[in-house]
Amino acid sequence: MELKLASKKIVIIGALIIWAIKFIVRPLHLFGEPLKFFLGIAPNLFGSFLIPFGAYWFFSGKNFLLARLFRLQSAYDLGLVCIMGFGMLVVNEYLQLIPFFGRTFDYYDIVFSLVGLAVAYFVFGKIQHHYEPRAN
């Protein structure tokens, strides 16, 4: 149960950081180009990093269909969740090409979502192995 609590804390703190970047820091336009670029991709980078933690927090210990699909009991399950999460992120980004949504499509968002998920795969795997040594 410790991993579920740790995942909950990581997701909540990560969501607060993303909201702060999107709604407080970026609208102020205080930064030059290198930092401005990072602030543009940061929500995707951090958000994709949170996917395995969110999946574990929301679906561990549950037994309905979606929980069985996103179950994180092994490295294989973790990889599957990361691949499905990346697929959803790519679909979300391509949906932004539709003018109705009023959002902007950016290849960097896809690239840094992949980076965030790759880092999350290894970090969550280490944390999972620490909390639940028999999971892998």
Image (cartoon, rainbow, N blue to C red):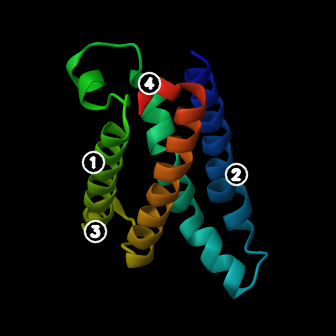
Q: Which residue is drawn at 28% across and 13% down?
A: 63
Question: Which kind of residue does numbered mark 3 sit on?
Answer: Pro
**Front one among 9 and 99:** 9
Q: Considering only order in the chain, which callout, 1 or 4, is on the residue closer to the N terminus? A: 4
Q: Is residue 61 left or right of residue 69?
A: right
Indicate which label's residue lies in the foreground, 1 or 3: 1
Question: Which kind of residue does numbered mark 1 sit on?
Answer: Met
> How many neighbours does mark 1 have within 10 angstroms: few (below 14), some (14-19), or many (20 or more)?
some
Q: Distance between the residues labelled 1 and 3?
A: 25 Å
Quadrant of residue 135 in the image?
Answer: top left
Q: Considering only order in the chain, which callout, 2 or 3, is on the residue closer to the N terminus? A: 2
Classify mark 2: helix, strand or loop.
helix
- Find residue 20 and name its label: 2
Q: Considering only order in the chain, which callout, 2 or 4, is on the residue closer to the N terminus? A: 2
Residue matched to label 1: 84
Provide residue 29's location: percent of width, then percent of height. 73, 74
Classify mark 3: helix, strand or loop.
helix
Q: Distance between the residues labelled 3 and 2?
A: 26 Å
**Front one among 135 and 4:** 135
Residue matched to label 3: 99
Indicate which label's residue lies in the foreground, 3 or 4: 4
Q: How far apart are marks 4 and 1 (CA)?
A: 16 Å
Residue matched to label 4: 58
Q: Considering only order in the chain, which callout, 1 or 2, is on the residue closer to the N terminus? A: 2
Indicate which label's residue lies in the foreground, 2 or 1: 1
Provide residue 118's location: percent of width, then percent of height. 45, 59
Quadrant of residue 66 in the image?
Answer: top left
> How many neighbours does mark 2 have within 10 angstroms: few (below 14), some (14-19), or many (20 or more)?
few
